[in-house]
Amino acid sequence: MTLRARLHRQLHIGSWPNGKLTGLNVFVVWVILAALLVGIVATEPAIRLPYQGEILIAEFIFGLVFLLEYAGRIFAAPEREGPGSPWQKRWRFIFSPIGLIDLVVVVVSLAPFFVANAAVLRVIRLLRIVSIMKFSRFSAAMREIGAALRERSYDLLVCATLALVLVLLGAAGLYWVEGDLQPEQFGSIPRALWWAVITLTTVGYGDAYPVTALGRLIGSAVAIGGVLLVALPTGIVAAAFSDAMQRRREAMARALEEMEGAGLE
């Protein structure tokens, strides 16, 4: 097996037939966790100022690892199945969502060494959180959740439409009932939308609430509808995720049986 094929096995496929991550991807996962920890801790001045040199060294190491991983993925991209020349496959990876996320992570990790503006550095430090998006490549659960959401997209769209209708009706009702009494909170439908969303999601900050009997009746209806609507997508996604994980377990079992059969032969 060539070096490029091994890199493709380690980076692009990322797991063995039994579902376990390859050694290189396990290392990258630990680097991501360490980079996230340092990025979060570095926002605290009491820690950042005394250990500024050590933090910069750590950030440089993380950026270098991410850069090497990104370069390795570009180098190994031609091993992917499908039509196209090696460079066509490389460009396809570079402009794919995963490739763009990798590029952003590399730029954000190395940017502090080329940017001196303190305000920009704060933004860059915050953007380091995007490195957590790289986990979607390593987590089978994340991939299964994505597949489950795609499978149930129509059902979730129906739930979202019902929620939108309920929010608009609630906001319009409070505007009609209490727009004159509380103009700051309900003087327009856009203003009342904030209350409707917070009530529908059962958060209830208390910064806006109806004071009339009819307004409270409308608020009660929106709150009860919110409880029912929150339960619907939760059940839909849970059922889809359970089905997806069952399919994954069956696929892994078949792969292991094939490996054992090939070994016996």
Image (spheres, rainbow, N blue to C red):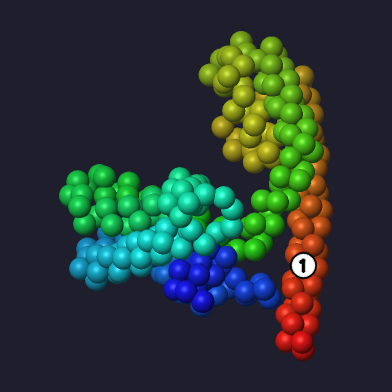
The local crowd at label 1, few if under 14, some if 14 to 19, many if 20 or more residues have their Cα within 10 Å, is: some
**Whether residue 18 is visible:** yes
Q: Quadrant of the C terminus?
A: bottom right
Identify the residue at image location x=80%, y=42%.
232
Identify the residue at image location x=60%, y=63%.
139
The percent position of residue 18, horizontal first and vertical second, equals: 68, 76
Extreme residue in the bottom direction? 264
Quadrant in the rendering for residue 55: bottom left
- Amino acid on which disc 1 is placed: Ala
Quadrant in the rendering for residue 14: bottom right
Report the front residue among 234 and 166.
234
177 lies left or right of 98: right
* Residue, disc 1: 251
As drawn, 156 above or below 98:
above
The percent position of residue 13, horizontal first and vertical second, equals: 57, 65
Identify the residue at image location x=73%, y=20%.
169
Report the front residue among 198 and 6.
6
The percent position of residue 113, horizontal first and vertical second, equals: 21, 57
**Whether residue 222 is visible:** no
Identify the residue at image location x=74%, y=29%.
161
Tag count in the figure? 1
The percent position of residue 127, horizontal first and vertical second, equals: 38, 50
Regarding mark 1 in the picture, which secondary structure is present there? helix
